[in-house]
Image (tube, rainbow, N blue to C red):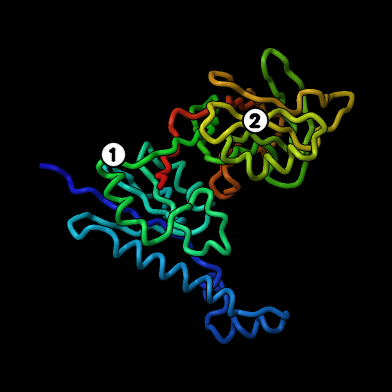
Amino acid sequence: MTIAPRALVVTRPTEYDELLAHHGTVQQARFFLHSRGQSLEEIERRHRLVRSALHAALAAIPFDWRRATIGRRDLSRFVFGPEDVVIAVGQDGLVANVAKYLSGQPVIGVNPDPQSYDGILVPHTPAAVQDLLLAAHLDRARIEERIMVEALLDDGQRLVALNEIFVGHRTHQSARYRIRFRGTEERHSSSGLIVATGTGATGWALSISRERPAPPPLPAPTEHALAFFVREAFPSVLTDASLTAGLLGAGESLGVVSEMSEGGVLFGDGIEDDRLAFPLGTGVEIATAEAALRLVQA
């Protein structure tokens, strides 16, 4: 028996939803913003566009397909199937949120508000969803495979991210660790380090790169390469500050060993709640992941 394909619509609360959850009523939310010289109208406009795009995406799913709607907070508990096609409706970061939980399922990124969102990972209009769904299901869609980054701890735990992985302290304390790259090893005290993909090269990694006098080249999104940057390395009698940036090619990895008695963490794509502990003596190898984001293109 052939299993019917399943369309999964992924979304997240809008600013409007969060305001209502916090203040209880529209009137209270409006009063709160007005008392601070702000307006609810623009937030309401963006909310209506997102709701309209969600409605259009759901309406575009063929009637004989299975379907489900998933909130961002539920992604870690959801079981994805090989027959799934994912529709992410929202800003670019929503695609990064879902990518780490997938294993080859195609993703259609839908931009509900081009005036507010760049649309790098959500390039499609709601009107395009129906044709893209069918093309993805029939393996006729044009797919861009974006490289992801993986951190593998020596205890077997694993973390995957689309943009970057951060290694450091969970507070603003200095992160202490040993870093190893291409046969060179240093002991560091810094604000932590990031290892970024070509997708992440348009965000946090780009900001850091612009501050460096001779940064390594940032990879392209489909390139099997990663860039790493150490943030604010502090030289002292115990620590060095020479090995602070580099480009990892295919098959290469960056090794890090924690020297933090407590508070050491790893997290991906800025999601601190979904972190791995990185206590004293723990080692991690960071490299390109085997899985890639399969982003449906027009």
Q: Of circles 1 and 2, which is in front?
A: 1
Does residue 212 sit above or below 98 in this rendering? above
The spot of residue 239 in percent (x, y) is: 83, 25
Give the image location of residue 187, x and y in percent.
Answer: 77, 24
Residue in front for this viewpoint, 228 or 273 = 228
Q: Nearer the viewer, residue 9 or 283?
A: 9
Residue, disc 1: 139
Question: Which residue reaches farthest top?
Answer: 183
Q: Quadrant of residue 242?
A: top right
Q: CA distance from mark 1 to mark 2?
A: 32 Å
On screen, 231 above or below 57? above
Q: Which quadrant would residue 18 be assigned to in this image? A: bottom right
Q: Position of residue 250 (x, y in %)?
A: 54, 21
User: What secondary structure is marked by label 1?
Assistant: loop
Placement of 170 over or under 212, stated as above or below: below
Residue farthest toward the left in the current orientation of the protein: 1
Q: Residue at x 59, y 75 (%)?
A: 42
Task: Locate residue 109 relative to residue 194 in the image: left or right.
Answer: left
- Label 1 neighbour load within 10 Å: few <14, some 14-19, many 20+: few
Q: Is residue 252 left or right of residue 176?
A: left
* Label ID, residue 227: 2
Q: Residue at x 31, y 44 (%)?
A: 136
Callout 2 amino acid? Ala
Amino acid on which disc 1 is placed: Asp
Horizontally, residue 154 falls left or right of residue 187, namely left
Residue 162 lies, in percent from the top left, at: 52, 40
Q: Which residue lies most toward the front here?
A: 298
Circle nearer the N terminus (1, 2): 1
The label on residue 238 is: none
> Is label 2 in a helix, a strand or a loop?
strand
